[in-house]
Image (tube, rainbow, N blue to C red):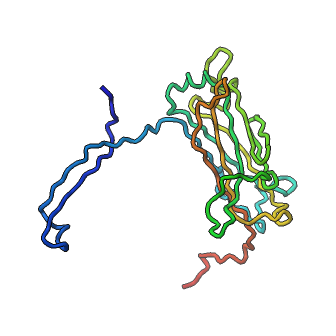
Amino acid sequence: MQNHPKNFAQLAFTAQISNEGSTLSYSSTKVNKNGNMKYYRESSAGSKLIYDADQIDQLGINLHDLQSDYLNSSNTASRIATTVKYDLSATENLESVLKNSDRVEFTLDLRGRNKDDSGLGYPNECYTDAADYISIVSNNGYLLSETDGVWSMTIPRSAYVDQNGNLRTDGVFDGAAFNLSIDIWVRVNNVESSNHLYDNYKVTLNAKLFDSGNHVIDQPVSDNIIYTLCKIQPEFILRTDSVTP
């Protein structure tokens, strides 16, 4: 006998009859009947990828109001500190999955908003010249290499499984999730010379878990952050607390 989840959705149907259309909704002559089909949601168990900026104010970069605390030493780029969490806590047989894996690969890319009349949404294709807009640095000792606008980083099996075949929790893996610290450096010294737009930009993160045969055995839904690049004179912004009725 197959076991079904206790929670499900089921359609209910109501038929009503009335002499006049205006009183149909109030008619007591009606029949209620539940549908024969029960609809179950697919299991939500599995991995989840979470990508967040550590400080929300770093996502707004105003070239007329750059924050010195976020600039690099040469004042050419503004920092966005981000945190990655590849959560595998809900993965079935997690220990076995990881022990039989080979590596975890992360990729990051950049997209600007669509340049059509709507200006809404982001294209499927990432910027191949993204390195002219940003640079990305890992703070966990793993190299992020860039090719054609895509940054890649590999976490080898040895980082989360020791020589005896036991899971390691003394590094980027905590027993349930991979946790990484990554800095996005947004270039602020070439915006106009390179004809970059003052607009929103999306940095998308993807993760894949591979086995030794180079097969993907887990791939969570991607996540992203969006930052805004602008050039606004702060003194021209009207403060709401200074407005008199």
- Compared with 192, 168 (above or below) is above
Q: Residue at the bottom extreme?
A: 245
Q: Residue sitting at 70 percent across and 55 percent down?
A: 111
| Image quadrant in which the N terminus is located | top left
- Compared with 155, 152 (above or below) is below
- Compared with 52, 200 (above or below) is below
Question: In the image, residue 161 lies at what x, y percent?
Answer: 65, 22
Question: In the image, residue 34 lies at what x, y percent?
Answer: 23, 48
| Image quadrant in which the C terminus is located | bottom right
Instruction: Between residue 203 and residue 63, name the one nearer to us.
Output: 203
Q: Residue sitting at 63 percent across and 26 percent down?
A: 169
Q: Residue sitting at 78 percent across and 66 percent down?
A: 63
Question: In the image, residue 3 lies at what x, y percent?
Answer: 33, 29
* 7 lies left or right of 92: left
Instruction: Between residue 31 and residue 75, name the one nearer to us.
Output: 31
Instruction: Between residue 11 and residue 8, name the one nearer to us.
Output: 11
Q: Residue at the top extreme?
A: 164
* 25 lies left or right of 1: left
Instruction: Between residue 182 and residue 226, name the one nearer to us.
Output: 226
Question: In the image, residue 189 lies at what x, y percent?
Answer: 84, 61
Count the numbered circles shown: 0
Tell me where residue 164 sits by quadrant.
Answer: top right
